[in-house]
Image: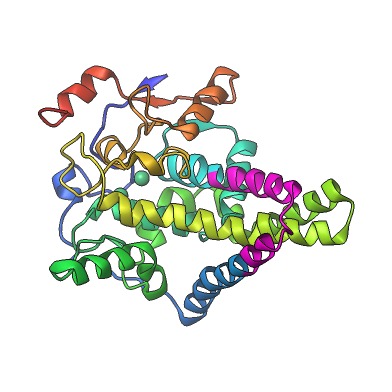
Amino acid sequence: MRTCGREGSIVVDLPDATSEQQQRRPAGGERIVAIETPDQVANLLVTVVPLLLVGFAMWRAWGGALRWPDLVVMALTYTLTALGITVGYHRLFTHRSFKTSRPLRALFAALGSAAIEGPVIEWVANHRKHHRFSDEPGDPHSPHVGRASGLRGALRGLAHAHIGWILGGEEMASRERYAKDLLADPVVRFMDRTFVVWVLAGLAFPFALGLLLTGSIVGGLTGLLWGGAVRIFCLHHATFSINSLCHFFGRRRFETGDQSRNLFWLAVPTLGEAWHNNHHAFPTSARHGLRWWQVDPSGWLIEGLERVGLVWDVVRVTPERQLARSAPGT
Ligand SMILES: [Zn+2]
Ligand SMILES: [Zn+2]
């Protein structure tokens, strides 16, 4: 076990990043990477198609066609792909909160890819850029930067942070600048290049499971509907809510210099990621839920894997360090 000694800083190998203040410099010299039109079309498709299919699934469920195998398939695929994002993409690849073997790195990258939130290196680069510029110009998805005042401005800011930034893509991060370490990692590079394979596997799995549980092609197709489209829709919006709601609503225990917040009711669907103020205060911590009652299934999984020897060098933040950074009265 190692304890977190660089709370408040970001684990990004940038040669000129020596302090938080330097890291949070304005985006002036930043090269803005605009996403290409085919990417924008793909982003639009993966956000709109699941929405339409969710409508279809709801209509079928209303007609009594929802059966327990569909719910089992959905719960399983949601949990696995969500962990791919929270434990894999976020805590392992972005922040290096723990270390693990090559096969487990590949597995987490595959599960994260199946969530269809983009290839691993692109996701990591954007998220590291978010930490670097948190709620300042250069942040790819802040609900606050450049927003007008009033309710209209707030709603526009939230819409941008939730999904607008993906479709617009003006502040996408450069992979070379923000994820040099991953570009140099053969396992991660391979998983990044084969992204589409894992996306397809993430659709084949619920179909196969539905088929297995019901013994019928129709069961396979409804498995695909719930474990594919509905699951993608729900997980997308759980993740997007971290970017929008968790920088807008909720409580702040730590003074982080940004607007990150802990939003308790979002902790279960996001598997612990909604303790977002904690996370901005201690980005490298493997646990985002820092108090015993702060539900954090992703942190629990990392500690469980540590106990059986599958992960090691888990970053922890001592209670003393937490206390030292706590805002008065929290
Ligand atoms: Zn954030
Ligand atoms: Zn993060």
Residue furthest front as drawn: 63
* 192 sits left or right of 260 in the view: right
Magenta-tinted stretch: 56-82
| Residue 217 appears in view | yes
Residue at 14% from the left image edge and 68% from the top image edge: 150
**Image quarter of residue 148:** bottom left
Give how far across and how far down residue 188 sits, in percent: 55, 49
Give how far across and how far down residue 247 sits, in percent: 26, 52
Give how far across and how far down residue 272 sits, in percent: 43, 37
* 324 sits left or right of 167 in the view: left
Quadrant of the frame with the N terminus: top left
Quadrant of the frame with the C terminus: top left
Magenta part, dominant SS: helix
User: Which one is nearer the viewer's eye here, 138 or 18?
Assistant: 138
Give how far across and how far down residue 9 sits, in percent: 25, 39
Residue furthest bottom as drawn: 37
